Image: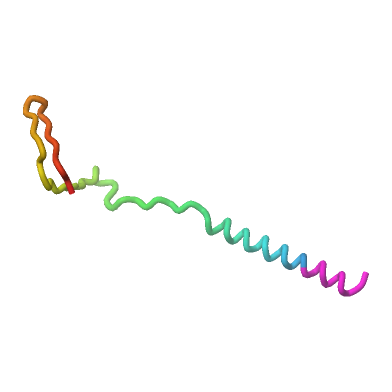
Amino acid sequence: MNRRAQFGRLKRLLLLAGLLSASIQLAHSSETLTLIDRPAADSGPTEISAGIWVVDINSIDSAQQSFVADVA
C-alpha cells in the first residue's frame, strides 16, 4: 500500500474520531435540566397574586349575575 492511501485512511479515521467525540459532547450537554425547587418549599403553599385592569364594563346582567368587560 502506498503512503497516499495510508494517509487517506488515517485522515478518515481522525475525522470519524472527531465526529464521534463531538457527538458525545453534544449528547452530554443536551441532558434535561433539573427543575429548580421553589423557595421555602417545606413551609406550605406558596401564595401568589394576580391582577387585571378593567378598562370598560360594557353590560351587566343582574339576572344572570354576569357582566361583559374590556380588560387589559
Q: What's the colour scheme?
A: rainbow
At 67% from the left and 62% from the top, the residue drawn is 19
Residue 49 inside the magenta-drawn segment? no
Position above or below: 68 against 41: above
The quadrant the N terminus occupies is bottom right
Query: Where, by quadrant of the figure, is residue 5 drawn?
Result: bottom right
Residue furthest left as drawn: 62
Residue furthest top as drawn: 63
Q: Front-most of 29 and 15?
A: 15
Position above or below: 17 against 55: below
Left or right? Give the position of 71 relative to 16.
left
Position above or below: 52 against 9: above
Place of residue 12 in the rendered image (x, y in percent of width and height, measured from the top left): 77, 66
Place of residue 43 in the rendered image (x, y in percent of width and height, measured from the top left): 24, 46
Residue furthest right as drawn: 1
At 62% from the left and 59% from the top, the residue drawn is 24
Count the marks: how many? 0
Residue 6 inside the magenta-drawn segment? yes
Query: Where, by quadrant of the figure, is residue 11 drawn?
Result: bottom right
Magenta-colored span: 1-11
Q: Main secondary structure of the magenta part?
A: helix
Left or right? Give the position of 31 relative to 5.
left
Residue furthest front as drawn: 58
At 80% from the left and 69% from the top, the residue drawn is 10
Left or right? Give the position of 60 relative to 18.
left
At 88% from the left and 74% from the top, the residue drawn is 3
Q: Front-most of 51 and 54?
A: 54
Place of residue 25 in the rendered image (x, y in percent of width and height, measured from the top left): 59, 61
Query: Where, by quadrant of the figure, is residue 64 drawn?
Result: top left
Place of residue 63 in the rendered image (x, y in percent of width and height, measured from the top left): 7, 25
